[in-house]
Amino acid sequence: MTKKVWFAGILSLVLVSLFSLAAMADDVINLDGEWLFQFDDDLAWADEDYDVSDWESYAKPAEAPALGFGWYRYEFEVPADWEGKGDLEVQLPVLNDFDWTFINGIGIGNGNRAGKRKYSIPGTYIQYGEKNLLAVRVYTINPGIGLDGNITVELTGSVSLVKNPSFELPTPYPANWIPNGMDKKVFLWEKAATVYTGFHCLGLRATDTLVDKVGYWQSDIIRTKPGTEFKAQVYVKAEDPSGETTIQLGFFDAEGKELGERAVSRNLARRTADWTRGNVRADAPEGTVYTKIFLVSKENSGTVWFDDVSLTIE
């Protein structure tokens, strides 16, 4: 290989690498700059409008003296042209030891051990072309660093078509909650830091008052084109999974008639101690106008908790 050919090859690799980095940079927001920090604990500190004029300012979150409860806040702008291009993901490379993380006052995730975090941010939670607030509530066991690293918010390219996938937005009830019977108490809200995302999830309890002991929730109508491949996903935890717990996809025509049999996942609630993920895939059949997601708890003795419902185009 001549020197000219070798140099041209190296130059091409460099140009490709630079182009890749530039493209990546267009989809990544680095949260560099002023971080605000406050010792102690108050859930109101997740709110966008909370007065933080007396909080300490640090060039990096690692500079804040972490021990016990402390809150970190950072404001950043999401480009207006990101709207409709997909959900976002926040990455926290170093976190010690427990966290509860919020975007614009809405919980997006929590963890109970030291390590990295990756939390999905539904596009419906974002204010495009405007300021957004990342607030991280951290409990640090030993004196040291609570939050550190190159913290980023990235555009994922995957689009969740569910308006309120984590049941975090304030509504009187989950969208289209339908008891299969007369006992409306089967639909429960759980407010605790142990849920998979944030502080709210949906609980279904299939009591004796329900028809066939089945409780279910259905999503809003999702406009669909025939032939589109969908993946529906949910996180599940159960108190006593004695029956069947599934996520289902139903396809409907213009008159509201369901087309064929629903696509049904495997039985999901087999573990009670922690959250487990389940999904179902299906292609929209000919004649489909819209799709619905169904969360179903059948003949389970205890409550089944659902969170992070998503429907993505494959």
Image: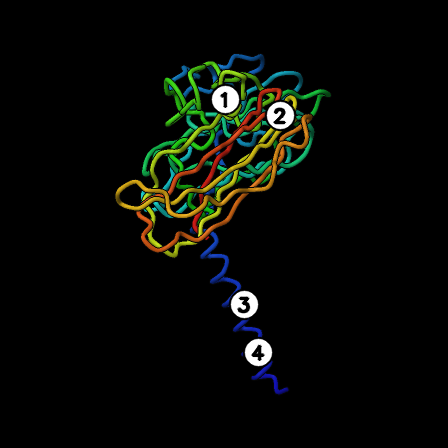
Upstream in sequence: badge 3 or badge 4 = 4
Identity of the residue drawn at 51% across and 25% down: 212
Q: Is residue 8 left or right of residue 157?
A: right
Question: Against 229, is 293 above or below?
Answer: above
Upstream in sequence: badge 4 or badge 1 = 4
Farthest residue to the left: give it: 255
Disc 1 from disc 3: Cα separation: 48 Å
Give SS at disc 1: strand
Residue 238 is tagged as: 2
Upstream in sequence: badge 1 or badge 3 = 3
Q: Is residue 225 left or right of residue 27?
A: left
* Comparing labels 2 and 3, the label whose residue is closer to the camera: 2
For disc 4, the neighbor class at 10 Å (few under 14, some 14 to 19, many from 20) is: few
Disc 1 from disc 2: Cα separation: 15 Å
* Comparing labels 2 and 4, the label whose residue is closer to the camera: 2
Farthest residue to the bottom: give it: 2
Q: Write down the residue under mark 1.
A: 200
Give SS at disc 2: strand
Residue 135 seen in the figure: no
Q: Write down the residue under mark 3.
A: 14
